[in-house]
């Protein structure tokens, strides 16, 4: 309906333009007086007419006084016959300059054919545009099954400046080493073929969100300088059955024509989930798309120089047929960056940002364990925004540390005004966390204590490890439980009551104690085994389902051991708080005064 209305408006506009052109092209008759034949005869007899120009059936009369007149005569009658019929003397006629002009060819034909051709022309234009509209719709319908993959031709001069290489990817050294072989496969395949090696058909990039999977795929394409097709897994699946499989066929057809090249499928778990685990049966559109991917990857001709890169953060839900040798031959895992990798990532993202001289990116890297590459990029961006908000020209350590807390906990909520009583409770709560964390030997050092609200937290105690940890002991978990209960116990000891401020701490402590028993085998009485299998139900999205492999009697024992661990941690926390109330009061006093205590001030208080 919208396209039809648009076409009608176009036709109306064309009609107005053409009519205006013909109107302007027509001779202006405003100054020419139309007279009758009798009047003309009278003027000739009175010798008032100076000249007469005959153009077909139109007589253009010029008077001696300077006037212009026009007379219409019969088409089949000559001018001389007309004058004779009116009895005009020959001597009067001889005194008038008479000129005969024949109509030009184009004017004659235009004047005679235009009334018929103009409507036909409009109808023809209307039919043409309507036919073109229908043809375009048919073309779009035929293109519906074609691949939506975007191609980046790395050999174009425009793209050379924007090319991403391994220099733009910091950290992930092992992953880059594996992918350098992929680049060699594409640039010099002969070396491998001569040794009887088969070029891998697929490389699966596995890692948490933000670890650089897409960036690495672009770097591979940039290093190899080959065409790069990229598409998301969700773009294959449509509401119409068979469209996804058609798009897969079209994608691989284009890839083979552009060989050597790279095909990158982002978030492949959108179509690569395990078959038969959800609704829809074997005729589900997603499963048909997956089947076509399997066929295309397995149907490659040997050494065709097309490598499929795929990225996912959920390798556990992928179909086993997708991961077998011959399809995705390699699996490259991208871990969270360690301190050295974080430092390199910060250097990459800080190239275009001005810093003051005393800025230490090493200190920023030390404070950001668990941050992904995307988190670190976001951190520096937030620091730049905060610096601009303060009308500063260079980024300092204060802005960087504030940005770390903003990324971790959320923005400061200074507008959230607490009463004096609530402020005091919050101060004792956070002081309890900080005191217990400082006194226990296996807990990370306290970097900052604050009673300024951030995100959903009324206050926070920030602990940062001295080095990256990949394994944790049972004793560390028990001490962490004591730290989590430190605020709750402090409220009980100081005020004789508890508040809702410890809700998040209690939930975290309960989950940690349960995981110690059910996942880590750290139970005192149940032995070294795990309890329960957690599986994701595909058709319920992110909802998790726990399949019990233990009885109700064991469930009771698990609950009892969770309570034992929490009570044991509470006893330890209470002992530390009651034995160090002077230090606790010092922390609270400084918090109420300054609202924030940094690491140096805190250690001074504790010493």
Image (tube, helix red, strand yellow):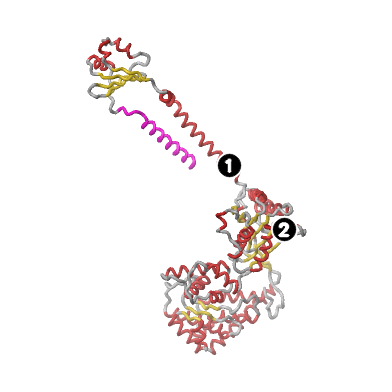
Q: Which image quadrant for residue 325?
A: bottom right
Mark 2, Cα crowd under 10 Å, few <14 / some 14-19 / many 20+, is many
Mark 2 and mark 1 in contact (Cβ < 8 Å)? no
Q: Disc 1 and disc 2: Cα gap in Å?
A: 38 Å
On the image, numbered disc 1 is attached to which residue? 139
Disc 1: CA contacts within 10 A as few (<14), some (14-19) or many (>=20): few
Figure check: 265 above or below 570: above
Could you tell me if residue 500 is visible in this image?
no
Image location (x, y in percent) of residue 291: 69, 53
Q: Can you see residue 304?
A: yes
Which residue: 64% across, 82% down?
Answer: 475
Residue 77 drawn above or below residue 372: above
In what element is the residue under mark 2? loop
- The answer to which quarter of the image holds residue 201 is bottom right
Residue 528 on the magenta span: no
Instruction: Give whichever of 87, 591 is nearer the camera.
Output: 87
Image coordinates of residue 437 in percent, x first then y, are 56, 82
User: Magenta span covers which residues?
Assistant: 1-29
Whichever of labels 1 and 2 marks the residue nearer the N terminus, that label is 1
Considering every residue shown, the one lying at the far right of the view is 196
Disc 2 target residue: 199
Determine which of the numbered discs, if any, sits on residue 76 in the image: none
């Amino acid at each position: 309906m919208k396209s039809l209305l648009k076409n009608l408006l176009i036709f109306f506009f064309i009609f107005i333009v053409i009519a205006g052109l013909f109107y302007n092209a027509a001779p202006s008759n405003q100054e020419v007086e139309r007279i009758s034949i009798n009047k003309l005869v009278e003027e000739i007899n009175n010798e008032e007419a100076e000249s007469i120009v005959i153009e077909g059936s139109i007589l253009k009369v010029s008077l001696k006084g300077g006037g212009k007149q026009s007379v219409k005569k019969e088409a089949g009658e000559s001018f001389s016959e007309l004058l004779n019929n009116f009895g005009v003397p020959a001597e009067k006629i001889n005194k008038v300059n008479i000129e005969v002009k024949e109509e030009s060819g184009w004017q004659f034909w235009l004047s005679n054919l235009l009334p018929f051709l103009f409507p036909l022309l409009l109808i023809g234009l209307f039919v043409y545009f309507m036919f073109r509209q229908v043809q375009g719709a048919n073309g779009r319908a035929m293109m519906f099954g074609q691949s939506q993959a975007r191609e980046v031709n790395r050999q174009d001069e425009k793209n050379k400046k924007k090319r991403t290489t391994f220099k733009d990817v910091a950290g992930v050294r092992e992953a880059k080493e594996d992918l350098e072989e992929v680049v060699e496969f594409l640039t010099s395949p002969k070396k491998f073929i001569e040794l009887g090696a088969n070029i891998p058909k697929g490389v699966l990039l596995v890692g948490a969100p933000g670890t650089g999977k897409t960036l690495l795929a672009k770097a591979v394409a940039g290093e190899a300088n080959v065409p790069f097709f990229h598409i998301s897994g969700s773009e294959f699946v449509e509401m119409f059955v068979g469209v996804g499989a058609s798009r897969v066929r079209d994608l691989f057809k284009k890839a083979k024509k552009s060989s050597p090249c790279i095909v990158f499928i982002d978030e492949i778990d959108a179509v690569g989930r395990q078959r038969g685990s959800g609704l829809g049966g074997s005729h589900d559109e997603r499963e048909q798309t997956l089947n076509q991917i399997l066929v295309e990857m397995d149907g490659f001709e040997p050494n065709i120089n097309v490598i499929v890169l795929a990225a996912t953060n959920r390798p556990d839900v992928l179909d086993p047929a997708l991961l077998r040798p011959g399809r995705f031959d390699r699996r490259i895992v991208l871990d969270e960056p360690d301190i050295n990798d974080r430092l390199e990532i910060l250097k990459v993202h800080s190239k275009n940002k001005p810093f003051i001289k005393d800025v230490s990116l090493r200190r920023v890297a030390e404070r950001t364990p668990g941050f992904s590459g995307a988190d670190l990029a976001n951190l520096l961006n937030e620091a730049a925004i905060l610096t601009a908000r303060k009308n500063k020209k260079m980024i300092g350590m204060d802005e960087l540390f504030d940005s770390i807390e903003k990324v971790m906990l959320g923005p400061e909520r200074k507008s959230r005004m607490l009463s004096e009583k609530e402020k005091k409770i919050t101060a004792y709560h956070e002081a309890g966390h900080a005191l217990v964390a400082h006194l226990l030997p296996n807990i990370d050092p306290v970097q900052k204590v604050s009673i300024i609200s951030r995100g959903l937290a009324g206050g926070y105690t920030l602990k940062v490890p001295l080095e990256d940890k990949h394994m944790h002991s049972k004793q560390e978990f028990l001490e962490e439980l004591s730290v989590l209960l430190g605020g709750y116990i402090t409220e009980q000891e100081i005020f004789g009551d508890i508040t809702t401020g410890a809700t998040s701490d209690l939930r975290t402590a309960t989950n940690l104690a349960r995981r110690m028993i059910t996942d880590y085998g750290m139970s005192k009485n149940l032995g070294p085994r795990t309890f329960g299998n957690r599986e994701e139900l595909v058709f319920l999205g992110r909802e998790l389902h726990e399949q019990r492999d233990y009885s109700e009697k064991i469930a009771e024992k698990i609950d009892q051991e969770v309570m034992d661990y929490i009570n044991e941690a509470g006893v330890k926390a209470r002992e530390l708080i009651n034995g160090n109330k002077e230090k606790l009061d010092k922390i609270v006093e400084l918090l109420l005064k300054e609202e924030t205590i940094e690491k140096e001030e805190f250690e001074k208080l504790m010493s």
